[in-house]
Amino acid sequence: MIKKVLIANRGEIAVRIIRACREMGIETVAVYSEADKEALHTQLADEAICIGPAPSSESYLNMEQIISATIVSGADAIHPGFGFLSENTKFAELCEKCNIIFIGPDSKVISRLGNKSEARNTMENAGVPIIPGSREAIYDAAKGKEVAREIGYPVIVKAALGGGGKGMRVAENEAAFDMAFRTAQKETKAAFGDDTMYIEHFVQHPKHIEFQIMADKYGNVVHLGERDCSVQRNHQKMIEESPCAVISDELRRRMGEAAVKAAKAAHYENAGTIEFLLEKSGNFYFMEMNTRIQVEHPVTEWVTGIDLIKEQIRIADGQQLSFTQEDVKLTGHAIECRINAENPEKNFRPCPGTITDMYLPGGKGVRIDSAIYSGYTVPPYYDNMLAKLIVFAKNRTEAIRKMQSALGEVIIEGIDTNVDYQYDILHDPKYQAGDFDIEFIAEREAKNRQD
């Protein structure tokens, strides 16, 4: 039995994991950088250990320090949350070598799915629909151009290893390819220390749909429905919801079956997310698989009634899934808004600083996942997400109205946030009609500039 979990993360996800562990009777160990000494997660955990200076490279990405903290504290397991080391093959291997339970898939699976080219090939061999693209790694523009001609323009050049929207460029035609390739490869090298690229056909105006899956050590794989993550800026998600407004029961069944097939092909264990691009025609294509819990997992928890963090811990502890596919019923509608410390009027410039006063909404069907408090100083070293505001209602119309009301109640003084920006999106007729895709924010901003 897992009796003590070290959380190798910070912020709201660390707080979320601590709360789940408490409810399960499991002790928790927080790790923190010098900049996070007064952070909420360090105060809520049973123990807290400093692992280094403020820069994440010297603290939250310092594998040796985290492993040492785990051993010193006597923790049985590590929960990596999302970001930082959550999809790092080497870190998962270190846990395995040190007989520490890694709450996630094993290192070989992370490695296989973390390489986008290999993941594509795995899915294609399993019969999961994929976007036409390169089967081998591409290292130079000349070879890439040959592949692009075969695939057909427009194409997108992507980092084979990486994520977060970095190392990605679209080439509308052959004349634009060389610049797109060089720019994407340069960014990839700087961000991930690797210049391996791959190329695929660029699907225009799709929705970004992801399916949550859970898989145990006994071959049981279940999907928990979809999340529509199409409201995003520069490939960074802003608003997520479940279920998707335009997916029929039949399409959900087909996409869910593909997601389960993908997880089984990868011999997957624990929580994972299969990401698809969905065309208006109803055709969908595998994009990638995230081998961790997602930022937007609360919307799935609300429409299914299943606690994904607790389920992750149970699976890592060797237990079978506590539910079957037949048990999963999507009820109602949930929406999540990511509240960030940034100024949308100044090109979303990050805004660290001290929160001088704050009020966050509550009430029936309103959930806040956050680690901020009045007097808390938001450090400049990490992701600028402050909180996740999640609402639940019996249908999408009521959920939108509830989110509008909740956003209108948020008060965060002392720093800039994107609350007003989110509020405006929730009042956009296209959003309200469900008539949006991954180009929604870009087109909206272009229109606002013209006006």
Image (spheres, rainbow, N blue to C red):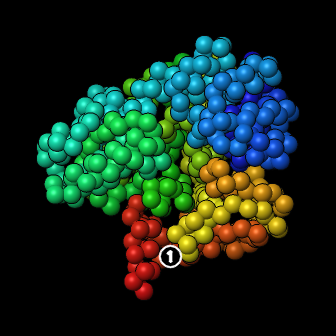
State the residue in front, 190 or 103: 190
Horizontal arrangement in the rendering, residue 327 relative to residue 135 (left or right):
right
State the residue in front, 99 or 276: 99
The residue drawn where x is 75% and y is 46% is 35
Horizontal arrangement in the rendering, residue 313 relative to residue 155 (left or right):
right
State the residue in front, 91 or 320: 91
Q: Position of residue 400 (x, y in %)?
A: 59, 68
The amino acid type, in three-letter code, at marker 1 is Asp
Q: Which quadrant of the rendered structure holds the C terminus? A: bottom left
Horizontal arrangement in the rendering, residue 399 relative to residue 43 (left or right):
left
Q: Position of residue 184 (x, y in %)?
A: 34, 48
Query: Which quadrant of the view contains residue 173?
Result: bottom left
Q: Position of residue 92 (x, y in %)?
A: 57, 23
Above or below for 22 versus 105: below
| Residue 96 appearing in the image | yes
Query: Which quadrant of the view contains residue 86?
Result: top right
Q: Disc count in the image?
A: 1
Residue count near mark 1 (Cα–Cα under 10 Å), binned few <14, some 14–19, many ≥20:
few
Q: Please, which residue is most extreme toward the bottom here?
A: 451
The residue drawn where x is 28% and y is 33% is 137
Residue picked out by circle 1: 428
Horizontal arrangement in the rendering, residue 118 relative to residue 61 (left or right):
left
| Residue 41 appearing in the image | no
